[in-house]
Every structure is written in C-alpha cells, then in structure tokens.
Amino acid sequence: MSVNKVIIVGNLTRDPEAKYLPDGKAISNFSIATSESWKGKDGEKQEKAEFHNCVAFGGLAEVINTYLKKGSKIYVEGKLQTDKYEKDGSTRYSTKIVVKEMTMLGGKDKGESSEPAQKPASPAKAGFDTFDDDIPF
C-alpha cells in the first residue's frame, strides 16, 4: 500500500489562471505560498517560504477561478504529481499538487466564504465498509 496525500494552508501568490478543455471542463492553475519561522542559534527570527504549484479540475476549478484571487487564504488537499518534459535539449521535471478538496479561509468581508467548496465524501461513499453500531467492543 502507498499513500500520496498533501495538505497545505497558505495564500495564493497570483490570481488563478482559468483554462478550459475542448469538452468544456474547467481547469484552474494557481500557486500557494506557505511559510515557517523559527529562532536561529543567535536568537534571531528566521523565516522560509515555499511555493507550491497547484491545479484543480471541473466544478472545483470553477469555484477557485470565480472566488479566489491573489492573497486569498486557502486550505487544500490533494496529491503530488510530477510531470517530465524536454526543454532546450534537457529533461526537466515539474511537481504540482492536484487539488481534490479546498476550503476558502478568508473572511466574508472580502467576498470570500468559509464554507468548503467540496465536502469530503462520507466513508460509505468513498468505498469504505460501514460499521455496525451493535459491535460489542
């Protein structure tokens, strides 16, 4: 068994880029910045930012394209995907998060909602067995 799951909370570094496939399916490409801070050996505050490229599809992409903008705070869950391509005669790799779930975390005063755009599936819908409440332990 293997697991490929990513959970991050951060801010969009740019407005989402909306695209559409020939069949009309929406795509949203965007980037999220996360940061961490700590005190160095000298007691000074240190900070490091990471930038994560993300892509979402379908209805979730439509919500992202419509309601989010640069600076929006967002929670995403998804999986890592690495693409391989050729550029200038050399092989390059690009890793991104394929977003499966998203929650907008900004306040409503900015036109954002705190409701999840896609609710997680219940265990029964996700293909897990349901448990009988009459189990004696």
Image (cartoon, grey):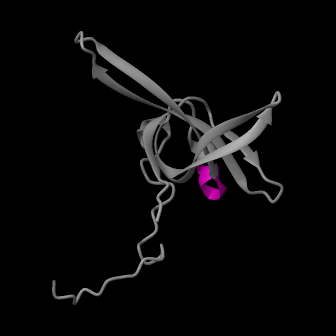
**Image quarter for residue 69?**
top right
Residue 75 in sight in this render: yes
Rendered view: 87 above or below 4? above
Q: Residue at x 66, y 57 (%)?
A: 58
Rendered view: 79 above or below 15? below
Q: Quadrant of the C terminus?
A: bottom left
Residue 67 placed where, x, y %?
A: 57, 43
Of helix, strand and loop, which mostly describes the magenta segment? helix
Kindly give the residue lying farthest to the left in the view shown: 137
Specify whether 59 is left or right of 125: right
Residue 5 placed where, x, y %?
A: 47, 53
Q: Which residues are magenta?
A: 57-63
Residue 119 vs residue 3, the one in the foreground: 3
Residue 123 vs residue 113, the one in the foreground: 123
Residue 60 placed where, x, y %?
A: 59, 54
Residue 103 vs residue 114, the one in the foreground: 103
Rendered view: 104 above or below 128? above
Residue 66 in sight in this render: no
Q: Residue at x 45, y 25 (%)?
A: 49
Q: Residue at x 24, y 9 (%)?
A: 42
Kindly give the residue lying farthest to the front in the view shown: 90
Specify whether 108 is left or right of 62: left
Q: How many marks?
A: 0
Residue 48 placed where, x, y %?
A: 41, 22
* Residue 3 lies in the magenta-colored region: no
Q: Residue at x 74, y 45 (%)?
A: 19
Rendered view: 69 above or below 45? below
